Image: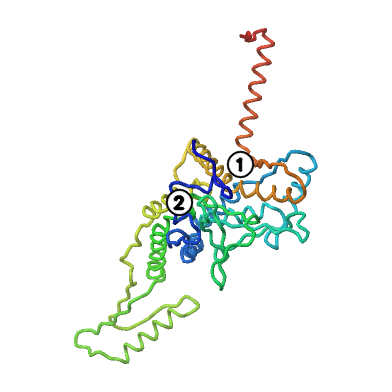
Amino acid sequence: MFGKPRRGKTAKGFVQTVPKTKQNAAALSFLRAEYQSRAERALYDSMRASVPIIDAAIEKIIRLIGGFTVRTGNRSSQAIADMFIKNVQSNGTALGMPHFVFSYLDSLLSYGEAVGEMIPDSRHTGITALYNASLDDVVIRAGSSPLEPVVYLNDAAGLKPVKNQKLIVAALLNQQPGTVRGKSLISGLPFMSEIMLRIFSSVKTNWERVGDVRFAVTYTPDAGESFSEESARQIADEWRKAMRSDNVCDFVSVGNVSIKAIGADMAVPDCEVPLRAVLEQILSKLGIPPFLLGISWSSTERMSEQQADILTSELEYYRAAVEPAIRRIVETHLRLNGYTDNVQVLWDDINLQDTVELSQARLNNARAMQIEKEIGWEEEDV
């Protein structure tokens, strides 16, 4: 009915909703909106550096994602996979695949994109190292088909495709339709971050003005008394001496001298309400419950449990985002060792609270069954 696919092309190369000129890599004109710029990544880096709560939330997500193991088809391949995950070199300074995954997820959350590379040994009998590529050095773009993204190397000579794409793993977070670019977790927060930084800058300035007390010393000559510059200079010198003294010192003056603290009548604006409104917007975007970041707002135990359930679903989503890279890396290592097993990723429990509750429920069911047997009451099988 649909005809046979042409020889030399795969069925996934034909995407009907993409113009033919755009599917042709040679004729593809890349628009600036179709890929992430270095300035945008620099903005995200500055946000994490200047707003600690954003950086703390991302670090918390990475730690809460937990560890993982893999399951293969037979015992020998399982031993090779376990040894690989535990001892593979990651980025030159760490051992173990989890270090690579955490850095991979950090890039994915911060920029919406992540690129990693598998480094085979000299005899191509396995993967000897894993490397997290900087997004300033590579660019993810569409190939001949939008279903086949290609990673380009960005060097002084310009953009050129990486030679062996099979050794490259890439991921896009919240991929925007029609483009090969991801969406950062902190996208949409620059405006709120600017408001928050402006509030703190104002607090700093106000406390510099009010907290560090400055005085206005005014000398007013009495009626019929002529103004003497020498007297004013002596008063200024005595006041300066009294203020700079290491010990408590009295200021004694003759004449009509008044002393007033500058800014004493001004009250520091209350920033709690606007700051909380900004923090609520930021935390709603990050998906982290406030109590995990040390923020104590009015919260009930039931509300905390619901927030923990929401966080669990968020972590499951991020696990699903990095799981394809884990499977592909381990399967590639097994292929180079002569095994064709498929790999299943098994994640650790996110928290022990769910495990305790399930164990308690099983214990209660066992006790109920025991009591039913003791009293001779059992449900009849239907």
Amino acid type, residue under disc 1 in the picture: Ile
Disc number for residue 21 = none
In 3D space, how far apart are the residues under numbered discs 2 and 1 (Cα atoms)?
29 Å
Residue 294 lies, in percent from the top left, at: 52, 50
Q: Quadrant of residue 201?
A: bottom left
- Classify residue 126 as left or right of residue 142: right
Total count of labels = 2
Instruction: Find numbered disc 2 in the image and state the secondary structure of the residue it sits on.
Output: loop
Instruction: Find numbered disc 1 in the image and state the secondary structure of the residue it sits on.
Output: loop
Q: Nearer the viewer, mark 2 or mark 1?
A: 2
Residue 341 lies, in percent from the top left, at: 72, 42
Disc number for residue 350 = 1
Relative depth, front residue between 369 and 247? 369
Q: Residue at label 2?
A: 176
Residue in the picture at 57% in, 44% down: 320
Quarter of the image containing the C terminus? Answer: top right
Up/down of 117 relative to 369, above or below: below
Around disc 1, counting alpha carbons within 10 Å, would you say few (fewer than 14), some (14 to 19), or many (20 or more)?
some
**Colour scheme of the rendered structure:** rainbow
Sequence order check, earlier mark of 2 and 1: 2
- Classify residue 144 as left or right of residue 124: left
Relative depth, front residue between 38 and 176? 176
Amino acid type, residue under disc 2 in the picture: Gln
Up/down of 110 relative to 349, above or below: below
